[in-house]
Amino acid sequence: MLLRAGILALTLSAPIGVQAQPAPAIPAAEPAKVERITLWRQAGVTSLALANGVDIHMRQMARPGTGRVTIAVLVPGLELDETAATRGTAMLAIDALKPVPGGGEASLKVAQRPEGLLITTSCSTNEAVAAVRQIAATLAAPALDPAAFERARERALTQSDTFVHRADHKASEAMIRLMTPSEDVRLRHPTRANLEAVKPHDAETYLRAHLSSRAVDVAVVGDVDPAKLGPALAAELASLPPRRRDRLTELRAIQRQVVAPGQADIVAHGPRAMLAISLPAPAIADLADARVASITARLMERRVADALRESGLKVSLASGVAMTGRTYPSLGAVIGSFLLTGDEPRLTAASGVARSALLKLIEDGPTSA
């Protein structure tokens, strides 16, 4: 059973399997600001494409009258754009980003995601426009808090130093080496040297350059009336500089190494070891194959753990996870992780035991057992 690529891509700008229909009339206050209005009927999402490259997506997900909304804004890139010279910059810059004060009830939360910068908040429907105004101001003139920057660096340095000695981190890096020959620095945690090289001014410059040019997707869900809220949000976001609707396909493309299924790697520390074993998994665009990957992960967890126990090893942790290719579509993997205790000969043989169990699962398929 070889897995093809797959999982449903639930991107609001282009829902898969949903037909775009002409939207009901929404009064765009200034037509020059809104290029296109689309209603994704099955998803219940109304999308506004602004002339400056910003996209707004709204969905009613609460009974009218509840008066609450959740807002999420994604700017793709930043970490995806990093090179050997800038590795770690995005993480530190985003952690130290200081939101522009809004004066309303909305409290902005800023976070780094593999896909980019994410800003979220929850507020009353009446405060939604003010919250988006605050977000737009933060994107237009991003500034870093120097003290927060140094705290973020210290946390990252501590984490980097800890990772060097963790068996699960070593197993994870070994699994990446099995999946791709690429030495791309984005696939590995920033080193101490990377983090110490980042200067606050350079991080702020890096952040400003990307936030002024990258696509912006704004999602608003809850007690939402698109006909009323859409034009007001468009008016706030239309002041952002023009930008391309670039999903950074080239930056996400990494060569996948073709290897035999069931590659395994083990990292031992005395009588204990962490074993990882994998199969290729889908990208995030095929729901059917994603379900197959999920089932395979559960079966892998059980079958491999049973085989390891039968070989005389103690299995204190067994986990099978389907990690579909998201940020890097080619690097999806079904990964089994097993924390083992035993004598050296049995630990040495563990990789072979795990691989044999997985290959038997591939050959025989699932059973009722």
Image (cartoon, rainbow, N blue to C red):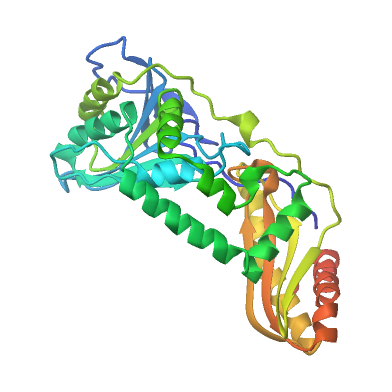
151 left or right of 364? left
Residue 203 placement (x, y as % from top left): 44, 36
Name the one closer to the observer, 322 or 203.
203
Residue shown at 48% from the left, 34% from the top: 76
* Furthest-top residue in this view: 32
Residue shown at 13% from the left, 40% from the top: 104
Name the one closer to the observer, 146 or 241.
146
Looking at the figure, which quarter contains the C terminus? bottom right
Name the one closer to the observer, 184 or 52.
184
Q: Is residue 9 above or below residue 298?
A: above
Residue shown at 39% from the left, 24% from the top: 54
257 left or right of 185? right
Residue 201 placement (x, y as % from top left): 40, 34
Looking at the figure, which quarter contains the N terminus? bottom right
Residue 250 visible to the viewer: yes
Q: Is residue 184 above or below residue 272?
A: above
Task: Examine the image and state in which quarter residue 123 appears.
Answer: top left
Residue 114 visible to the viewer: no
Task: Examine the image and state in which quarter residue 251 appears.
Answer: top right
Q: How many marks?
A: 0
Name the one closer to the observer, 105 or 208.
208
Q: Is residue 101 above or below residue 56?
A: below
Residue 264 placement (x, y as % from top left): 79, 65
75 left or right of 309? left
Residue 359 placement (x, y as % from top left): 84, 67
Task: Examine the image and state in which quarter residue 5 appears.
Answer: top right
